[in-house]
Amino acid sequence: MKNTSSRATSAPLSFRKADESDLTELVRLRDTAARWQIEHGIEQWQPGELGGEHFRERLREGEVWLATLGPDGPSAGAWELWWDDEPAWGAQPPVAGYVHRLMTDRRTAPPGAGRALLAEAERRIAAYGRELCRLDCLTSNARLRRYYEEAGYAVVGEQSGKNGDGGRTYGVTLLEKRLEAG
């Protein structure tokens, strides 16, 4: 039986690529994370901002990964993995993978799940033969920036005036981490 109302810490996280059958769950994870952010005074995501079509497009253009508690357990989180990100980083040589929308379900994800998801994304990028993991966060989100810096990421720049989810304009801090060869 799936435990969806409290954190389960006994099952290890399992990772798999998402597919079309996961669109509803990806939207639920994103909206749940957005509501948590709002409840904690973090202005980043809004519920309802991204629907199934967003994730369908990401499945076509990149990779979307799901983390579950064990191979058959409830969802614990997800992230998008892109192989380029010109809107934020400009034209770049193919040396990095770009992590977007790293999200956990705080009802089911064990402590440290966000770092585990990030580490799995880094392993995937290194296995693909890329030497850098890159990501960004809102310049105004000092808490998330600190989280990434504590995970070994270094700030390498800022971009302002980006148009993003929901058509909002915002600034982002660009961070990257050098990876061990996969």
Image (cartoon, rainbow, N blue to C red):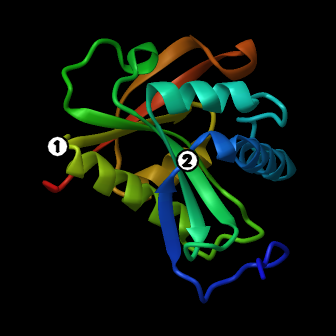
Quote the CA–CA distance across marks 1 and 2: 21 Å
Please tell me whether residue 157 is drawn above or below residue 131 in the rendered image.
above
Please provide percent x and percent y for residue 140: 63, 33
Badge 1: few (under 14), some or many (20 or more) residues near its Cα, within 10 Å? Answer: some
Task: Give coordinates of residue 84: x percent, y percent.
Answer: 35, 24
Question: Left or right: 177 with respect to 121?
Answer: left
Question: Which residue is situated farthest in the left direction here?
Answer: 181
Q: Residue at x 57, y 13 (%)?
A: 162
Q: Is residue 178 something that shows in the picture?
A: no
Question: What residue is shown at x 72% (from left), y 71% (from top)?
Answer: 108
- In the rendering, at what x and y percent does residue 55 appear? 63, 32
Nearer the observer: mark 1 or 2; the answer is 2
Along the line of sight, the residue nearer the viewer: 12 or 156: 12
Q: Residue furthest bottom?
A: 10
Residue 44 occupies which quadrant of the picture? top right
* Residue under numbered circle 2: 18
Helix or strand or loop: what does disc 2 sit on?
A: loop
Q: On screen, 124 above or below 13? A: above
Left or right: residue 154 compared with residue 31:
left
**Quadrant of the image containing the C terminus:** bottom left
Q: In the rendered structure, which amino acid carries the disc numbered 2?
A: Ala
> In this figure, which residue is indicated by the disc labeled 1?
129
Residue at image coords 80%, 78%: 6
Count of marks overlaid on the render:
2
The quadrant the N terminus occupies is bottom right
Q: Is residue 175 visible?
A: yes
Q: Is residue 20 left or right of residue 52?
A: left
User: Badge 2, how many Cα within 10 Å: few under 14, some, many 20+?
Assistant: many
